[in-house]
Image (cartoon, grey):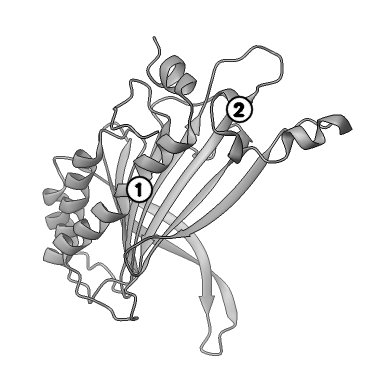
Amino acid sequence: MTTSAVYRHPPIAVVLLEVRHPVSELPAPALPLIKETLRDYTPIERVERTMGFEIAPNGQPIGAKESILPKFVSRDVHTAVTYRPDGVAIETTDYLGWEWFKQVAERALFARQEFAPVDGIERIGLRYVDEVRVPHSNGVLDWSDWVVSDLLGPRKQVESLGLRLQEQQSVFQFQMPSPGMTFTLRCGIGTGAVVQSSDNLRRPQEPPRDGQFFLIDSDAAWVEPEGKIPEFDPSHILNVSEELHSPIKKMFEELITDKLREEVLNGSD
């Protein structure tokens, strides 16, 4: 079953668009111009500190190295734009719909290319992470009420052994119709949360630490099929992103039950 419904209680934990490009440091004079361009969405300038290894010419690591990345966040700290030397990342934990998210992405990509141009596109990735949570008593949670049984592994086959499924992960990889596009689906049962809040990107509501959820992690990506590096054109990137986005909602709908739609996603507060 597919539907274009917008749910009252969507299970989206985070949406991420990542555009990788050849390494190009962001010059300091560009930061005020980028900040002004992003002010309607992510007006707060911050930094993100990451640790990595410095590599010698012979390929051997020679020590840890801290990187400081420019980051711009929304006032509620639910949306962020990060400029890395090798890419631009737009992410949100409070998803307001695809058209809104595209507007944020368009502004972020335009700002990078307008004020600190890069040489091309190496990869475009669009990822939706859903953490499906449902009400249940202290008894065993039967996920077959909420997601299609194909995702749940050999539960029935091992019941006679006295085994009860506690955690599970599966990975499915698909090739999309358009050349260079792939779709990876990760799903399974987990506890706590996949997506953690940080100082620069917080979840609107913190999930229970011991709460069980079902993960539906949809990751669509594009690379130039002939190995070329096309120009960094924000319009082209958004067109590709639109095509990557197309199967994500449909895939989610095919994997859940009407019971989940009616009682949880569109249920009362």
Identify the residue at image location x=19%, y=39%. Answer: 100
Of residues 167 and 66, the one drawn nearer to the viewer in this rendering:
167
Q: Check disc 1 and report its element: helix, strand or loop.
A: helix
In which quadrant is the N terminus drawn? top left
* Residue 30 at x, y percent in the picture: 16, 63
Judge whether 246 appears above or below 69 on screen: above
What residue sits right under mark 1 in the picture? 247
Judge whether 38 appears above or below 239 on screen: above
- Residue 179 visible from this viewpoint: yes
Identify the residue at image location x=29%, y=31%. Answer: 76
Q: In which quarter of the image is residue 118?
A: bottom left
Q: Check disc 2 and report its element: helix, strand or loop.
A: helix
* Residue 24 at x, y percent in the picture: 28, 73
What residue sits right under mark 2 in the picture? 144
In the rendered structure, the answer to whether residue 229 lies left or right of residue 252 reads: left
Per the model, the C-alpha gap separating discs 2 and 1 is 23 Å
Judge whether 28 appears above or below 198 on screen: below
Identify the residue at image location x=81%, y=36%. Answer: 158
Q: How crowded is mark 1: few (under 14 residues within 10 Å), some or many (20 or more)?
A: some
Q: Residues within 10 Å of mark 2 (few under 14, many from 20)?
A: few
Identify the residue at image location x=31%, y=64%. Answer: 178
> Looking at the picture, which amino acid does disc 2 mark?
Ser
Q: Which residue appears farthest toward the top when viewing the image?
A: 268
Of residues 159 and 105, the one drawn nearer to the viewer in this rendering:
159
In which quadrant is the C terminus drawn? top left
> Looking at the picture, which amino acid does disc 1 mark?
Pro
Q: Quadrant of residue 204?
A: top left
Judge whether 136 appears above or below 192 on screen: above
